[in-house]
Amino acid sequence: MTHSAGTHPTACLALADGTIFYGRGFGAEGSTEAELCFNTAMTGYQEIMTDPSYAGQIVTFTFPHVGNVGVTPEDDEAMDPVASGMVVKWDPTEPSNWRAAEPLSDWLAKRGRIAIGGVDTRRLTRAIRQQGAPHVALEHNPDGVFDIEALVARARAFPGLVGRDLARDVSCTQSYAWNEKRWAWPEGYAPQTEARFKVVALDYGAKRNILRCLASAGCEVTVMPATSTAEDVLAQNPDGIFLSNGPGDPAATGEYAVPMIRELLDETDLPVFGICLGHQMLARALGAHTVKMNHGHHGANHPVRDNETGKVEITSMNHGFTVDSQTLPEGVIETHVSLFDGSNCGIRVADRPVFSVQYHPEASPGPQDSYYLFERFAAAMAERA
C-alpha cells in the first residue's frame, strides 16, 4: 500500500506494530531503521545527536523547542552525528544564539541524518514507556509518497540492539593523545599543559567532554581502540585506566572487552574508572550480569542517590541496558541507585580504587553535580603514586 501525502506530510515514521506518524521532514532525504528512544533533556540536542552511545537509535525529544539555538562545531561530542535520526514536536525555527554557526536542518542534511517534525511526541513517548523501545523506520520524501507496508516491514526487520557489538563501529581505529580541557570563558577549550597523571582511555564510543574532564582533572590522556589488549594498555605505563561510554549490548562488546578488563584487574592495582557502557562492562568483568531495559534512561534530569553519603545528584543519562544489582558479587558495593526506578547506577570494589557509574558525570548536556568523580579518580592515582 502507498500513501500520497500531497503537499502536506513529507516524512513518515513507521513503528513495527504498524502505528504510523506523519510529519514534515527536514535534514537529509532518504530512509533509515533503528530503535526509537525518547530523551527528556531541555537543551543539548547537538550533543545528544553526536553522542556515540546513540548508535543504532533514533531520538524523539520530549522538549518541543529543538533547533532554536542552531549548531556550533564546539558542541560536537563526535566528528559527526551518530544517532540515526530525530523526531520533534515543532519544526525547527531559525537559530537565535550568538554561538550558532548554522541551522540544525542544514547541519543534519550535510551529515546525512533524517528528521521529522510535527509529530505528537507526547503520544509517542507514552507508547515507548508502556510498550518498550520500538523498532522503527523513518523516511523523508519531499514528494510525500510513502510505501507504508514496506516501511513497516523494514521496521520489523531491524535486528535490534540485543546481542549487537556497536562499540567496535564507533571506536577509534588507532590510538591518539588528548589534551583539551573543559570549556571556560573566555579562552574556550584550553590545552592541558601541567598533567600529573597518565591515563589510558579505552574508547567504546567516548564523548569528547569526558576526555576534556579527564584532562581538566590533571590527566594526560591516551585514547585507545575498544579492541586493545591488556598488553597494549600496560605498554603505555598508565597511572590509571578509564572505560568509556558507548552503544550496543555490553554482553556483546564484553566478549572481547571483559577478558581484557579482568586481566588488568588481576595483574595490576591501577585505579579504574568507568562510565555508562564502561560501567556495565566493569560490572560484568567483576561477575555481575546486565539486562536490557524496557525503555532505558535518556535525559538530563535523572535523580541518583549516593548510598554512601545519602546525597542526591541530578544527572545526565543515556543507556538502554543496566547492571542487575542482584547479581553483584561479594566485595562489589552498590554505590548509587536511580530514584526513578531503583536501578543500579554505580559500583565500587571494596578496598580497591576501582569504581564506575551508569550516568554521565561529564554532562554535555546536563547538570554538573557529579564532576567530583573525575577528581576522585585523580585522587586515587595521586594516592597510589
Image: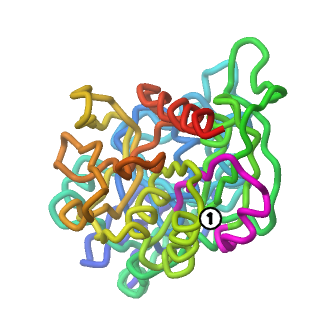
Quadrant occupied by the N terminus: bottom left
Quadrant occupied by the C terminus: top right
| Nearer the observer, 192 or 320 | 192
At a point 63% along the width and 73% down the height, the residue shown is 168
> Is residue 245 on the magenta stretch?
yes
Indicate whether 65 appears above or below 21.
Answer: above
User: Which quadrant would residue 73 be assigned to in this image?
Assistant: top right
- The residue where tag 1 is placed is 29
User: Going by the image, does 373 lie left or right of 122?
Assistant: right
At a point 74% along the width and 44% down the height, the residue shown is 198
Magenta region, residue range: 226-246
Q: Residue 111's spot in the image, x, y percent? A: 70, 57
Q: Residue 70's spot in the image, x, y percent? A: 62, 33
At a point 66% along the width and 36% down the height, the residue shown is 75
Indicate whether 39 appears above or below 157.
Answer: above
User: Going by the image, does 75 lie left or right of 3?
Assistant: right
